């Protein structure tokens, strides 16, 4: 009984803090509900203006709680910080709704990158995939997408058979230029001394004057 009373007493001591955390968590859930657009009626098309009006009303209503005396000092401090962060991010939060099917976050892209890294780790056993990116460049994403199933592989063959050679050469030049730029940045950041030395050698060789015959 004494142990049970001790447990109940600990729960009672944490009850107030837990209630505060739940209220502050609800603020985050409320703003996520506004930004994800789930409040829109079926068939209703979202727009930046609609989301802005709803967000601004909610922001103003929540800001009013700072002075109505219903929050503890800790909650007031946290709410003030939360509203300040939202105010700073406000110009960038609501920009994607006018274009249909435009992603609101970069979560899908981050999951794709994680999938690329996991695939490479299974193949090579290495956690660092810098060498893989330097060797393959932007082709990493293309290869992963085409290789997901047999139908996409067949689509690749069909597209390749109809590809214009001049267009292919142009795309290859663009890919090589982008990959070369990526390699230069990597060498400059991680192997700066060797990279600068190689540039000096190339410069000296290019500026050396040959004697006239």
Image (cartoon, rainbow, N blue to C red):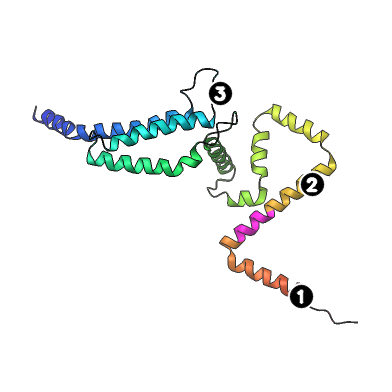
Q: Which residues are magenta?
A: 180-187
Q: Is residue 83 left or right of residue 144?
A: left
Query: Which residue ends up furthest to the top in the rendered image?
Result: 42
Mark toward the start of the polypeptide (1 vs 2): 2
Whether the residues at callouts 1 and 2 have beta carbons within 8 Å, the answer is no
Q: In the rendered image, which quarter contains the N terminus?
A: top left
Is disc 3 placed on a helix, strand or loop? loop
List the residue tagged with mark 3. Answer: 45
Residue 194, by quadrant, is bottom right
Residue 142, by quadrant, is top right
Q: Is residue 191 left or right of residue 160?
A: left
Report the mark closest to the observer, 3 or 2: 3
Image disc number at residue 170: 2
Residue nearest the observer in this picture, 154 or 113: 113
List the residue tagged with mark 1. Answer: 207
Residue 159, by quadrant, is top right
**Residue plotted at (84% across, 42% down):** 165
């Amino acid at each position: 009984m004494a142990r049970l009373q001790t447990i109940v007493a600990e729960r009672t001591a944490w009850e107030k803090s837990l209630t505060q955390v739940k209220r502050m968590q609800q603020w985050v859930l409320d703003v996520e509900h506004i930004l994800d657009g789930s409040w829109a009626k079926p068939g209703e098309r979202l727009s930046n203006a609609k989301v802005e009006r709803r967000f601004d009303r909610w922001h103003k209503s929540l800001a009013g709680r700072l002075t109505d005396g219903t929050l503890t000092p800790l909650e007031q401090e946290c709410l003030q910080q939360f509203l300040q962060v939202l105010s700073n991010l406000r110009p960038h939060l609501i920009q994607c709704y006018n274009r249909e099917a435009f992603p609101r976050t970069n979560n899908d892209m981050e999951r794709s990158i994680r999938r690329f890294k996991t695939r490479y780790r299974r193949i090579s056993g290495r956690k660092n995939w810098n060498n893989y990116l330097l060797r393959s460049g932007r082709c990493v994403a293309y290869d992963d997408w085409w290789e997901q199933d047999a139908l996409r592989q067949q689509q690749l063959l069909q597209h390749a058979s109809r590809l214009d050679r001049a267009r292919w050469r142009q795309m290859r030049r663009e890919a090589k230029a982008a990959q070369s730029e990526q390699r230069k940045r990597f060498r400059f950041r991680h192997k700066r001394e060797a990279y600068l030395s190689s540039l000096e050698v190339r410069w000296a060789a290019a500026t050396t004057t040959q004697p006239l015959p």
